[in-house]
Image (spheres, grey):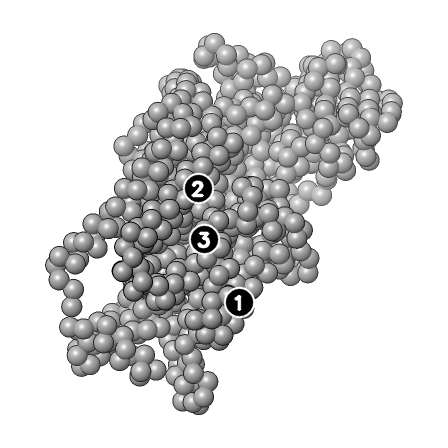
Amino acid sequence: MKSKRDYLNQIGFYVVIMISCGAIFLTGLWHGGFFPFGDRSMLLWDMQLQYIDYFAYFKEALSGNVGILYSFTKSLGGNMISLWSFYLMSPFNLFILLFSKENLQSFVVLASGLKMAMCGLTMGIYLKQRFQKLLPWQIWIFAVSYAFMEYNLLQISNLMWIDGVYMLPLVLLGVYRYVTQRRHGLLVGTVAASILFNWYSGYMVCLFACLYFLYEKLRSFDWRWRGNLNAYIKSTLGFAGRMLLGVGLTMPLFLPNIMQLTNGKGSFSMEIFHPEFTCTQGQFLRGFFVFEWGKNGEVAVAPGILMLLLGIAFFLNRRISKRERGYTFLFLGFMLFSVLFGPLNCIWSGLRFVYSYLYRYGFVVLFLLLYLAAVQTESLMEKYGRAAEKKKAAARIVSAVCVTWVLCETLFNLSYIYQRLYGVDINEYKTYTAAEEKLTDEIKEREDAAFYRVDTTDSRCGTGNNLNTVLNESMAYGYSSINHYCSTFDYNTNVFISKLGYSDYDMMSVFDYPILSSDALLGVKYMVSESECPGYEKTEIGDGTRTVYENPYSLGLGVKAEASVTEPVKETNPFLYQNQLFTNILGEETPLYGAAAYSKTEQENMVEYSFTAPENRGIVYAYITTETDKEDVHLFVDGEDRGNYTSWMAYKVFPVCEADGKEHQIQLRSDSALSRVEDVQIYTLDLDVLASVSDTLNQESMETTQFEDGVVSGTYESAEEGKLLLNIPYDAGWEIKVNDEKITPETMENCLMVIPVSQGENQIELRYKLPGLIPGLFTALLAAVVLLILQLRERSAWRASGCRKDAKSCAVHFQEKV
């Protein structure tokens, strides 16, 4: 039995690992001139485009300023549970309370360092418990190698996935304890924590844990006795039950998350099983030696030269049984084949294709490589341990060389990757955030209405090509918008927004250019822009660079609609689509847009459309249908470069000019030959018709008294029985009451809700209740009761076997029992 001194020494050793990892991380920051030693931040790729705004939302949610389960800052409004489950449940995110919104980049640095130190700590705990013969310095180099493996250094841009990295060793320690001692508390608890902290990386951890369990059982399994097979099956079923218990404990969060994911990326496709290879042999091999980012096809599984050599030596070590080496070869071979073979790669990636941040499960492959290196090192200690005790000077030299090598290699890799990838100026974000908060506050002070939406044509990461790549600022600054970008999207909302003409991309809600009629329909009342917005009126609000414009045609939250509002619109032309959409709402022909005649001129790398604009009160818009996947096709309007028109997140409908009666030209240009380009669609928006539509609908609109995340109420006076179109996307979680009577809504275009109203005054109330929450709570309660019963049985068995005082003999007892 361990003494109090032993426990203190062990805790002290773990503290040393964490402090060492922290010191290494800080050294890398200092060398690269990162905060707090310089002005460089660690915002990169999606961390800059998405997550930093999620963190701002998280801070506001903890402060009670925005909704947790539902928020109107997410596109037109949406369920937030999947966003929480995927991005925001890490316990380290609580440190965000220490930082202001302008200093969230500093939080990213702190969370990154803490998570890497945590990776080192949990790996140290696993190795200390799993490999009894490893010396402290040996455990230290493995822990440091795990904490600063290439995967972690690259995934700071996807910080939420590192929670799975530090949980993996604890889950596998739980597996080992279950296999050797039949103790399941750690296994169940760590499985639950892995899923709660980040279900996506938790899925990979659990999948690897199942394989690791089979490996641990097989390497010690004796096939000579039939009784052992029965015990093996019983143990496997018991393990599966404990894994399910861990999952069951997470159901209050995980079940609503799964239900929500079916509206977006959670949709399953059998196409993932199409047999193909994900990379070439050269790309695969370079992933073990070259510091390359997986976007070029290389898998980031470089464990370090020393660890790689030890791993290779494992298979050449005759002291290790052929059976163990054989099972290990199969295990490692399967994991490496998963990297190469498309269907397996998709299974590891969450049963779906991934097109960026390839090999997201790379950390489990790296763990296995380090595990083999640890087994080999323990074998060397068994062989040379006594000789090392006699030749202490030589042993010290070997340990010093190994520690120095790993430390230098780690610092080099860290500095190399940090210098190569990260480095956005920290002051840019601070300045932009302060200005954006000021603009938002001024809009809120100016506007008295409960409902309105705000959007922007410019963001802090503008590409210079009129592409708005940051789509979540509404979440950061607390206003309703159209824009939204995340992996947990609402498909029907995105499709509707795309049909209105904003973008061809239906996996996110993209807003680059204002479309006056679409903006009016969706209640966009204010536009923040560096340039004038056609049809909008300039306000007094601005910051010297950007100005706030007001849409005089924006509609309210609820407007009168005719019975035809729920009829599907089959038009694919965005202008004719809107004509039909407003016709269905009003119940009469509504020609908002009229087509313009044009001529077309084609060359090898250019196509030009010329037309004469009508002379009336209107705005000319255009849309060009292309089938090119080239990313160097630029749009020119009257000689003005409007930016890239065919790239990812590019706009669809764009304003050309006012209806001035003059001739205008639209061109698509490329540095190389253009592939197929369809004819342009040029239409003029009649502002007089739009004004008439706006006046008609706003005269018979709902008076909104409350518009908050998850709670909406208002009154609507109707001259007759009819329908009311709500500017809120349908979601099964909405409980809707009209005059205290629950109703089931219909939808317009599978998106906006349509509710029945009676003649006279209608009291309308909407409250959001998270789908799946109650069943999830019951499931978690049941899992907790079963776990408690198993814990009591386990404790009783330990006491009966006399294992309470001697854990080592208890482990032997349970192994013999199996």
Q: CA distance from mark 3 to mark 1?
A: 17 Å
From the top left corner, tell me how far across and down residue 148 is, in percent: 41, 44
Q: Which residue is mark 1?
A: 329
Q: Are marks 3 and 1 in contact (CB under 8 Å)?
A: no
Q: What is the quadrant of the C terminus in the image?
A: bottom left
Q: Quadrant of residue 126?
A: bottom left
Q: Residue at x 49, y 55 (%)?
A: 309
Q: Which residue is mark 3?
A: 307
- Give 205 or 283, whichever is nearer the viewer: 283
Q: Quadrant of residue 390?
A: bottom left
Q: What is the quadrant of the N terminus in the image?
A: bottom left
Q: CA distance from mark 2 to mark 3?
A: 11 Å
| Amino acid type, callout 3 | Met
| Amino acid type, callout 2 | Glu
Q: Residue at x 59, y 24 (%)?
A: 463
Mark 3 vs mark 1: give the one in front.
Answer: 3
Q: Is residue 703 visible?
A: no
Q: Secondary structure at mark 2?
A: helix
| Amino acid type, callout 1 | Phe
Q: Are marks 2 and 3 in contact (CB under 8 Å)?
A: no
Which badge, 2 or 3, comes first in the chain's sequence? 3
Which badge, 3 or 1, comes first in the chain's sequence? 3
Q: What's the mark number on residue 409?
A: 2
Q: Is residue 326 visible?
A: yes
Dot 1 alpha-carbon crowd within 10 angstroms: few under 14, some 14 to 19, many 20 or more: some
Mark 1 vs mark 2: give the one in front.
Answer: 2
Q: Secondary structure at mark 1?
A: helix
